[in-house]
Image (tube, rainbow, N blue to C red):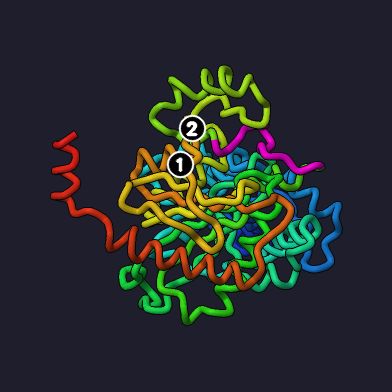
Amino acid sequence: MHNTLTKLVILLGFSAFAVFAFTPSTQKPENASVSASSPPTSKPSLGSQTITGDNASQADISSTDKLQSPQTQAKTIETNVNQDNTPTTLSAIPASNITNEQPLSEEKPIGQKIDNAIRSDHEKQQVQAFCKELSAKLRTIKYDGCLNLGLQIDETFKSVNGRVLTYRLFKSNQAVETSSDQAKGRILFISGIHGDEYSAISITYLWMLNMLQHTNENRQDWLFLPLANPDGLFRNPATRINANNVDLNRNFPSPDWDELAIPYWEKYYKKNKRRYPGPSASSEPENQWLVKLIDEFNPDAIISVHAPYGLIDYDGPDHATPNKIGALKHRELGTYPGSLGRYAGEYLKIPVLTLELRAAGSMPSNTEIYNMWRDVEEWTLTKVKEGAPTFLESTQATAQK
């Protein structure tokens, strides 16, 4: 009996040890490695894009007015970066925060590094939407022809209503492909600063098509801005002023703007709404874009197209005064506080040539456009570049005054 009890005790003890030893523990060992795998975060979103290629409806195009402004985009990006700690390649910088030290765009700065490569499907869609809306507004402009121009979208600035601001660079035939240093000059061509001047916008389209057909004849770098005031053009009816009811050609930051712009508008224009200079110099995003482009591209001359006076106006150094461009002959119109001529021509000393077409609703022929192009190049190469006074001559002339 005693032996039986002893064997039973030993058997129970062994069973208890086995249960304890082989039962899984719910407590992690101290040296266990802990790995927390969080779900993947999505990229920052700037709103859905409803425009899809050639099939975009008019309603889709109109919805581009409701896209986020650069200021809103910047806030969205900043919030998303702080949340998921991932960098973003978008460069939506509030226009009010842009200084002269900041490049126009980190990825595609205007100037020697600018190129004409479309970077993304989103940018292609924006160009398609722009061309669709433009060709629907102006019968001279064809949708396919607009697409073939290879327009680029500015990544930082948009119009007041969120429309894209476009540009196109034509390189000099003599220039090395990767540099503008070998070109004989740089010309900035600005069109559509007044949205109701249809011929000025249409001639720019035809001018660019002309250059595409004669690329081997191009001797300088041309930077085209085909529509500086898209909101004014796409209003119904089109207007001279932008969506903030500001005349962009009175909003440039000429040194006399603060003192004279508003008093001049009140006294001489009797507060004409079509010529309102705005609440402050360079208050409009379109003007901020233009000012930045002038600084970055550093043009030897600026061509600005308007209508309907049928002449060429010139503002800038006396040595570059032109005689005629095509059939248009020179006649002074003068400058105004906040105008491009006063800002760039008189203040920055960049020759500004204004081509005033004969009528806002009619245009020169293709032959006339070609001749105007050749005359502009001849003018810049002879009077602007070669005729420019040396530093010593400029100093002496200043001293004599």
Question: In terms of sequence position, does the residue under pointer 2 or pointer 1 come before the other?
Answer: 2
Image coordinates for residue 24, horizontal then vertical, percent: 63, 60
Please name whichever residue, 281 or 217, is drawn nearer the observer in this view of the structure: 217
Q: Which mark is residue 370?
A: none
Tell me the amino acid under the disc marked 1.
Gly
Image coordinates for residue 73, horizontal then vertical, percent: 61, 43
Image coordinates for residue 51, horizontal then vertical, percent: 78, 59
Please name whichever residue, 280 or 23, is drawn nearer the observer in this view of the structure: 280
Would you call the spot at circle 1 few (<14 residues within 10 Å), some (14-19), or many (20 or more)?
many
Dominant secondary-structure state across the stretch colored magenta? loop
The residue labelled by disc 2 is 336
* Tag 2 secondary structure: loop
Q: Is residue 79 visible?
A: no
Q: Is 245 in the magenta? A: yes
The residue labelled by disc 1 is 341
Segment tinted magenta in the rendering: 237-249
Quadrant where the C terminus sits is top left
Identify the residue shown where x is 80% and y is 68%: 54
Please name whichever residue, 314 or 261, is drawn nearer the observer in this view of the structure: 314
Question: Disc 2 vs disc 1: Cβ atoms closer than 8 Å?
Answer: yes
Tell me the amino acid under the disc marked 2.
Tyr
Image coordinates for residue 161, horizontal then vertical, percent: 69, 41
Compared across the picture, whether 62 is left or right of 184 comes to right
Q: Residue furthest bottom?
A: 216
Compared across the picture, whether 161 is left or right of 249 comes to right
Identify the residue shown where x is 64% and y is 21%: 271
Quadrant where the N terminus sits is bottom right
Q: Is residue 256 visible?
A: yes
Identify the residue shown where x is 61% and y is 46%: 309
Identify the residue shown where x is 55% and y is 73%: 211
Vertical comparison of 170 with 43: above or below: below
